[in-house]
Image (cartoon, rainbow, N blue to C red):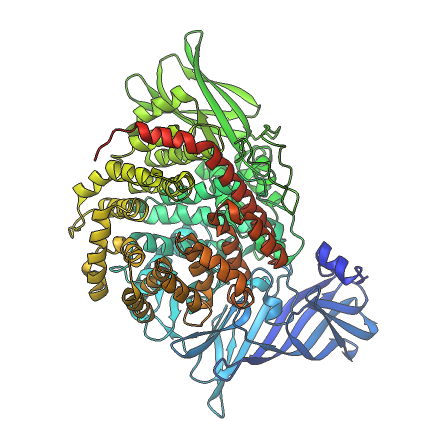
């Protein structure tokens, strides 16, 4: 029964535990003390129901040693032989005689090691003190203790921990009792948990301090942090309370766990992790001084806190049955966080933030090597690969589209029913569709499945015309391909087969059911909304009898598709920009750039649009220009060479400089956020991209002032000021920044100065930044981010790539799998000459979770090369025609 073929075949096919062995309860006693050393011991009893008679019971265990194994049955106990199977990360308990069917108890003693790779139960350190922390998603509970490590195998956990008396010990449940032992030891016993998937179990041990508690109804909320950071907890406590209150109202169901601890982990792989009742975060998302943090940092912290709290219902209480529905967890929590934080702080304009994320998801999803939101997952590594923009941001965009299609009330009713039906259990996408369909009184699957199960997304070609005295819109849908540009697909095919993509440059037959919403402007300057469900490849939409002055093809950017306006349509939009919402202007910029990159429009169409936005007052719209400007300056203009890069920089300065001069550098105390943010975005565009002398000079002065007094500048300017100071900086400034990093009093500041170290341009200073990455002065969680920034730094990128290749074995140990893929994703900045080298290197040194990222990176190399070839001449010609405003 348990023989599933050779080890190799198992690994290839993915290995699942037998469904007829069902765990219901774990009793876990752990002896762990991070100060004593990395070794820990555990005693474990698991109550299991055997549905059949077996002579072998298999469960997960990896990097653990099993020192004793027994099976207790109603007829007495049996010694089991524990056979570790590293290929499948399991242990088989072999018995001398068959047991079951019926209830048995597995009794295991084991030992493990706290490693520093941020997986399983791992070691972290801060200020010379040691901590033990767990991070178990997707499939690392098996590295912590032997268990049935699949999300559908939910069970109750009773956890006890023996450690030295002064340590704080935290887990999912409240403490039931504590026992003191001789030798300054204690055992902390926690109350039993409700049924949980193994990946949601949590443990933190070490000299943590705790904040005062705040309450949300009966729920006590606390923040745990390394010593001395207590004064930074106020913002997160408020955000947690406000979000929890709104989530309880939205779900119509109280918070499902007995308490809520938020733990600021000194070293952490993900941004945060939704362990039931004990959520772990990176410090910068939880410990924050509202007076010194940027608005973006505060919004991000609130959004991530809310995302994790949304998981308490959606993910923890109701859990996906298997990792192929990871998106059920993540898309929903992502959508919910923006929805709830927006209702708490409407002035933060959260949906404009979301638009930036969504734009990144659209870019990724236009590649041949994208994947459907719902996709097959065989192994834990497959699951880890899916923690990406498709699962989170595309998924959240589709959730948003469904919500708008069904209506907010119907959608909420359906989700509430889904949570009630499946609480403390597991569910699949089909269960969600059923609940939503019941609420709507019509099946939702026909609309939804196309978006969830097909990869890619449509582009809608829009043409306005008149017919029988009425305005008519013709809409044609096809899959959007990032590579319509001639030659972009001529390079050798990548390692794996792209899934279901079209042959070179041709449209596919993929179709979506699109709940289309457009914004129409009439001759009298009023705008209204037009809706149509589009199912066919081509559709006609009646826009009414009057004349339409303009049409925007994705109102409020509510749909996950790109509108392609024809030349006349785009001109009309450019002339009516103030009639669009800010999110629509952001969308227009992003879509036009993507269409240009794909060869569906000329580069001058984007540049004309950018020119029309010179007076734009919404910071988020200006920020949308940053990515395209950076590519044009750093890559396209650089390919052409000569005077072109400087001409483009001058053009940026001439068009966007006046707005900054008018705002000035100095902030008034009562100044609105929008003005502060606009100043910050303009400083970025003009300083970091255009190298505009007045900005560079001001930044240098302000950096010195900022180093002396952190309140010397508006915090929103701090990132740009630090970056610009580093670029022009010498060794003395490097030392000053390194000192500021090591003595920073907030996690945000620490991060800002650390990232600043990656912006220096002198070769010796680049080498120093690289060398730092191999020392524990840079926490494991940040190494990949620093290397990515060094790769993005024009003067540092080749040195960095050589360093990565040469020091790979050491570097890799400092980059957990999810973060190492970021490095692969960034390699296209190296430029076309390095494609072959990057491909060869990562094929010789593959990352288990990096296969898809490598394919995507190689595809991006090709797209960049093809685009630069096509766009260079028109770009130069367009610039030559621009009036000289100097
Ligand atoms: Zn999540």
Name the quadrant of the N terminus. Answer: bottom right
The residue at the far bottom in this view is: 182
Q: Is residue 801 visible?
A: yes
Position in image of residue 280 (x %, y %): 45, 64
The residue at the far top in this view is: 468
Left or right placement of residue 560 versus residue 669 in this view: right
Left or right placement of residue 647 versus residue 857 in this view: left
Q: Nearer the viewer, residue 10 or 224?
A: 10
Instruction: Identify the residue at image location x=55%, y=40%.
Output: 367
Instruction: Please count the marks in the image.
Output: 0
Q: Is residue 62 above or below residue 551?
A: below
Q: Is residue 10 above or below residue 128?
A: above
Q: Nearer the viewer, residue 872 or 468?
A: 872
Position in image of residue 207 (x %, y %): 41, 78
Position in image of residue 182 (x %, y %): 49, 92
Name the quadrant of the C terminus. Answer: top left
Instruction: Identify the residue at image location x=37%, y=53%.
Output: 300
Left or right placement of residue 229 versus residue 400 in this view: left
The residue at the far right in this view is: 97
Q: Is residue 286 visible?
A: no
Q: Nearer the viewer, residue 846 or 378?
A: 846
Position in image of residue 394 (x %, y %): 50, 43
């Amino acid at each position: 029964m348990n023989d599933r073929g050779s080890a190799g075949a198992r690994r290839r096919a993915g290995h699942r535990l037998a469904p007829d062995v069902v765990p219901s309860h774990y009793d876990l006693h752990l002896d762990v003390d991070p100060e004593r050393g990395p070794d820990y011991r555990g005693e474990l009893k698991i109550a299991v129901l055997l549905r059949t008679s077996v002579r072998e019971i298999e469960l997960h265990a990896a990097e653990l040693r099993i020192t004793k194994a027994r099976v207790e049955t109603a007829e007495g106990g049996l010694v089991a032989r524990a056979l570790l199977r590293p290929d499948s990360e399991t242990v088989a308990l072999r018995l001398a005689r068959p047991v079951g069917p019926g209830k048995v108890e597995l009794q295991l003693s084991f030992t493990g090691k706290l490693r520093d790779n941020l997986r399983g139960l791992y070691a972290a350190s801060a200020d010379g003190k040691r901590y033990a922390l767990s991070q178990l998603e997707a499939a690392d509970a098996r590295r912590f203790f032997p268990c049935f490590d699949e999300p559908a195998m939910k069970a109750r956990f009773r956890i006890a921990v023996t450690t030295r008396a002064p340590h704080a010990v935290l887990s999912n449940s409240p403490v039931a009792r504590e026992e003191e032992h001789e030798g300054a030891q204690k055992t902390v016993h926690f109350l039993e948990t409700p049924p949980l998937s193994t990946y949601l179990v949590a443990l933190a041990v070490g000299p943590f301090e705790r904040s005062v508690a705040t309450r949300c109804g009966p729920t006590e909320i606390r923040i745990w942090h390394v010593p001395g950071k207590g004064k930074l907890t106020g913002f997160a406590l408020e955000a947690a309370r406000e979000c929890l209150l709104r989530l309880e109202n939205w779900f119509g169901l109280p918070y499902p766990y007995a308490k809520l601890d938020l733990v600021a982990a000194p070293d952490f792989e993900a941004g945060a992790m939704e362990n039931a009742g004990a959520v772990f975060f990176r410090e910068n998302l939880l410990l924050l001084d509202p007076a010194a943090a940027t608005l973006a940092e505060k919004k991000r912290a609130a959004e991530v806190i809310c995302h994790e709290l949304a998981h308490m219902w959606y993910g923890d209480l109701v859990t996906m049955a298997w990792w192929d529905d990871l998106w059920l967890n993540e898309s929903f929590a992502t959508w919910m966080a923006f929805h709830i934080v927006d209702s708490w702080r409407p002035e933060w304009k959260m949906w404009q933030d979301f638009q930036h994320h969504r734009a990144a998801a659209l870019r990724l999803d236009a590649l041949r090597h994208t994947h459907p939101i719902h996709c097959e997952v065989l192994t834990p590594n497959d699951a880890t690969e899916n923690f990406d923009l498709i699962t989170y941001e595309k998924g959240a965009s589709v959730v948003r589209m469904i919500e708008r299609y069904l209506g907010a009330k119907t959608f909420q009713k359906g989700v509430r029913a889904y949570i009630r039906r499946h609480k403390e259990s597991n569910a699949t996408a089909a269960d969600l569709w059923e609940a939503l369909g019941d609420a709507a009184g019509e099946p939702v699957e026909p609309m939804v499945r196309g978006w969830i199960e097909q990869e890619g997304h449509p582009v809608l070609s829009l043409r306005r015309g008149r017919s029988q005295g009425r305005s008519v819109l013709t809409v044609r849908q096809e899959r959007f391909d990032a590579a319509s540009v001639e030659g972009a697909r001529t390079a050798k095919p990548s390692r794996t087969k792209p899934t279901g993509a079209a042959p070179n440059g041709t449209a596919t037959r993929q179709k979506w059911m699109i709940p289309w919403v457009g914004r129409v402007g009439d001759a009298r300057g009023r705008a209204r909304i037009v809706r149509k469900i589009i199912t066919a490849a081509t559709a006609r939409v009646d826009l009414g009898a009057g004349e339409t002055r303009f049409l925007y093809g994705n109102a409020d950017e509510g749909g996950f598709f790109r509108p392609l306006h024809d030349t006349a349509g785009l001109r009309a939009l450019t002339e009516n920009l103030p009639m669009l919402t800010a999110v629509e202007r952001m969308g227009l910029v992003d879509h036009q750039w993507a269409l240009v990159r794909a060869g569906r429009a000329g580069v001058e169409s984007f540049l004309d649009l950018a020119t029309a936005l010179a007076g734009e007052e919404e910071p988020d719209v200006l920020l949308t220009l940053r990515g395209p400007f950076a590519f044009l300056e750093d890559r396209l203009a650089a390919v052409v060479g000569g005077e072109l890069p400087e001409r483009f920089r001058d053009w940026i300065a001439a068009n966007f400089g006046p707005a900054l001069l008018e705002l000035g550098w100095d902030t008034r105390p009562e100044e609105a956020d929008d003005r502060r943010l606009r100043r910050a975005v303009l400083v970025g565009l003009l300083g970091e991209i255009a190298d505009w002398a007045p900005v560079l000079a001001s930044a240098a002065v302000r950096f010195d002032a900022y180093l002396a007094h952190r309140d010397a500048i508006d915090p929103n300017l701090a990132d740009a000021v630090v970056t610009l100071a580093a670029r022009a900086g010498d060794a003395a400034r490097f030392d000053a920044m390194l000192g500021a990093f090591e003595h920073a009093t907030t996690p945000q500041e620490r991060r800002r100065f650390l990232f600043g170290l990656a912006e220096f341009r002198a070769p010796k200073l680049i080498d120093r930044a690289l060398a730092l990455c191999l020392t524990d002065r840079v926490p494991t969680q940040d190494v990949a981010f620093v290397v990515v920034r060094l790769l993005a730094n024009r003067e540092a990128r080749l040195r960095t790539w050589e360093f990565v290749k040469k020091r790979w074995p050491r570097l890799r140990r400092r980059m957990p799998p999810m973060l190492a893929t970021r490095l692969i994703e960034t390699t296209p900045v190296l430029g076309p000459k390095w494609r072959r080298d990057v491909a060869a290197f990562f094929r010789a040194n593959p990352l288990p979770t990096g296969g898809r990222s490598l394919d995507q990176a190689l595809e991006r190399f090709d797209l960049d090369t093809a685009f630069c070839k096509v766009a260079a001449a028109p770009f130069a010609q367009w610039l030559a025609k621009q009036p000289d405003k100097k």
